[in-house]
Image: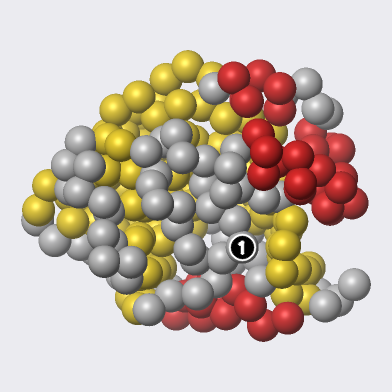
Amino acid sequence: MGTRWIFDGHIAGIGTSSGLRAVVGIWQHSPFGPFADVMVQHPSGHRQLLAPTEEVAGFISATYSFDEVQVVDVRGRLADRRLAVDAGPLVIRAVTGARALLGNGLRMVPRRLAVHPAWLSAVSPLAALAAPGARTYGTAGSGRAEYYGVSDLHKVSSAVVRFAGHDAGTLAPVHPAVTFGFSSVPAQPSLARVRTTVVEA
């Protein structure tokens, strides 16, 4: 294997009744230090990355597919089951609730195993059955491979989402699935504890 990048933190997937879908990354540990980013897919299908620095934007846009990349001030806070995101035109205020049924199963797998690339390669077909559209392993841009190791999952119970000053509507399933890469987030709005490993072939 070549160069390896590890991102440790949380991913939130949020859908709205207007059709706007957002995937929020809150990374406590990464090669770029702590940061937050947001991938937005508009009702038209337009895919937009909101990233905090040119360096982060360059890495993410080389790994995933976007129609537009913006470098903006991105602030993401996760505490006391509340998620607050301010990212240029996007504002999210969300509350997480009970652990999802899938989250109970994920917690039964020791985390050291749950985030290991070999395990994630093996269980990827099962992940797609448990959460349609989601996969734990696949190929990414720039000849990279990517592994998603999820060790916990909570439902998002409520959310207020605004884009460019307009209300995006009520909380709704992430539907259709987002198309930034080989995997989507679960259709049910949720917050995942995750370690993402990106490997250069």
Please rate how many residues cluster around mark 1, counting C-alpha atoms within 10 Å: few if below 14, some from 14 to 19, many from 20: some
Image location (x, y in percent) of residue 112: 84, 37
To which residue does mark 1 refer?
A: 182
Image quadrant assignment for residue 93: top left
The quadrant of the image that shows the N terminus is bottom right
Image quadrant assignment for residue 51: bottom left
Image location (x, y in percent) of residue 113: 86, 38
Image location (x, y in percent) of residue 75: 35, 53
Q: Nearer the viewer, residue 182 or 192?
A: 182
Q: Which residue is depicted at the point 20% across and 36% down?
A: 170
The quadrant of the image that shows the C terminus is bottom right
Q: Which residue is depicted at the point 52% across and 41% down?
A: 186
Does 168 sit left or right of 193 as displayed? left
Q: Nearer the viewer, residue 56 or 21?
A: 21
Residue 119 shows up from this direction: yes
Q: Which residue is depicted at the point 29% across and 28% down?
A: 158
Q: Name the amino acid type tagged 1.
A: Phe
Q: Nearer the viewer, residue 168 or 87?
A: 168
Task: Please name the colour scheme applied to the rendered image.
Answer: secondary structure
Residue 55 shows up from this direction: no
All told, the count of numbered labels is: 1
Q: Nearer the viewer, residue 23 or 17?
A: 17
Image location (x, y in percent) of residue 23: 43, 52
Q: Which residue is depicted at the point 71% across and 28% down?
A: 106
Label 1, secondary structure: give it.
Answer: loop
Does 13 sit left or right of 195 as displayed? left
